[in-house]
Amino acid sequence: MPRAAITGWGRYVPPAVLTNHELATVVDTSHEWIVTRSGIEERRVSHVSNADMATAAGSEALAAAGVDPSELDHVIVATCTADRQIPAMACYVQTRLGALRAAAVDINAGCSGFLYGLDLADGLIAAGRAARILVVGSEKITPYIDLEERTTAVLFGDAAGAVVVEPATGDEGILSINVGANGALADALTAEGAGTEFIGDDARLRIVMDGREVFRNAVSQMPQAALLAIKEAGLQVDDVDLVIPHQANQRIIDAVAKRLELPAERVYSNIARYGNTSAASIPVALAEAVELGRVHPGDELVFAAFGAGFTWGAAAVRWGPRVEPVATSDLAYPPPDRSALELLVDLHRRERG
């Protein structure tokens, strides 16, 4: 069976930056409180739609791979904050990219969504059902933020990341991947006010989270999934050059590093700058790590995530020979006409009537 390999990578992070100090003017919190509990110093607020962010990240990944959109067989978008429930957001991304012969589908697995999408792409490549697949993780979470609930309002930000997956030409590629879920704990991290359950209800659109339950399960399941991926890839932990975990909380990232007995320099973290971007966090971190020279040809990488559902997953990936993009995308959006704080407050006011 052909092995699936990542051949292109891209990201879109909105230009509007919201610092902890700015957020503290509308939320009962402080910079010190947020940093101590999460490691987050700032996050991004998008002035464009979720589909626009996904399109920008996808365009960059396609350019990096040297793949024309018309060559894509599938567009897979992992998101839990789609612009609309119907149709799949992937359909908008497909047409905006010009990938008109590609199938298009969304995956909602919360923060694990990108790995679920990568798992699907890996299976399609292995089965010979597809040759070029775009997997996107994209989230516009700021409309779901409840400014009256500081334990969740401080955590999330908007962003999109993407990869192109093709059959490997050498020994690179996805060596192993696993995903899982425990629906018995689904209500521990959910969104109220969205979905048919709330039609006719006065519930506000907001994220609801049992932080202790999420933390307890994340620090257990993410290392377990990572260790399984490493074992099934025929590797040892010492072989791993870089772990790119879901960026949920710096304390969770530190706990994962400790469970894997890896030094901090071999576990990538950018949560201080972006916060929790859910399904976007791993592909954004991967693209950033490549740009910063943290990924080298032949490196053994491990991705690990945990999210709403509860869902989890991990993958062991051997990087290919190329760390420079074939080309760059020229897709660009007009800059925002308001600050990140103004964008967030306007969203909050509209949602609260």
Image (cartoon, rainbow, N blue to C red):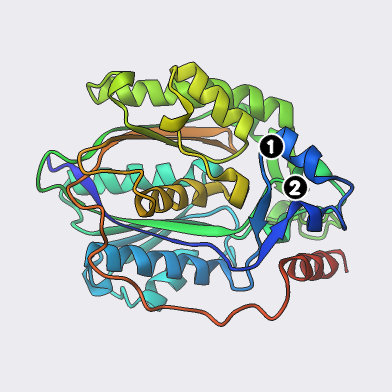
Front residue of 5 and 264 = 264
Q: Which residue is mark 2?
A: 154
Task: Please tell me in which quadrant of the rendered image residue 193 appears.
Answer: bottom right
Q: Residues within 10 Å of mark 2 (few under 14, many from 20)?
A: many
Across and down, in percent, residue 74 comes to 30, 61
Across and down, in percent, residue 335 comes to 59, 79
Is residue 276 visible in the rendered structure shown here?
no
Give the answer, above or below, for where 323 lies relative to 328.
above
Task: Please tell me in which quadrant of the rendered image residue 132 appears.
Answer: bottom left
Q: Which residue is mark 1?
A: 38
Q: Residue at x 20, y 39 (%)?
A: 298
Q: Residues within 10 Å of mark 1 (few under 14, many from 20)?
A: many
The kind of residue tagged 2 is: Val
The kind of residue tagged 1 is: Ser
Across and down, in percent, residue 96 comes to 41, 77
Is residue 94 visible in the rendered structure shown here?
yes
Q: Earlier in the sequence, mark 1 or mark 2?
A: 1
Across and down, in percent, residue 151 comes to 79, 40
Q: Secondary structure at mark 1?
A: helix
Look at the image and tell me in which quarter the C terminus lies: bottom right
Q: Residue at x 33, y 62 (%)?
A: 61
Front residue of 31 and 283 = 31
Q: Residue at x 69, y 26 (%)?
A: 213
Tell me if 22 is positioned left or right of 43 in this view: right
Q: Secondary structure at mark 2?
A: loop
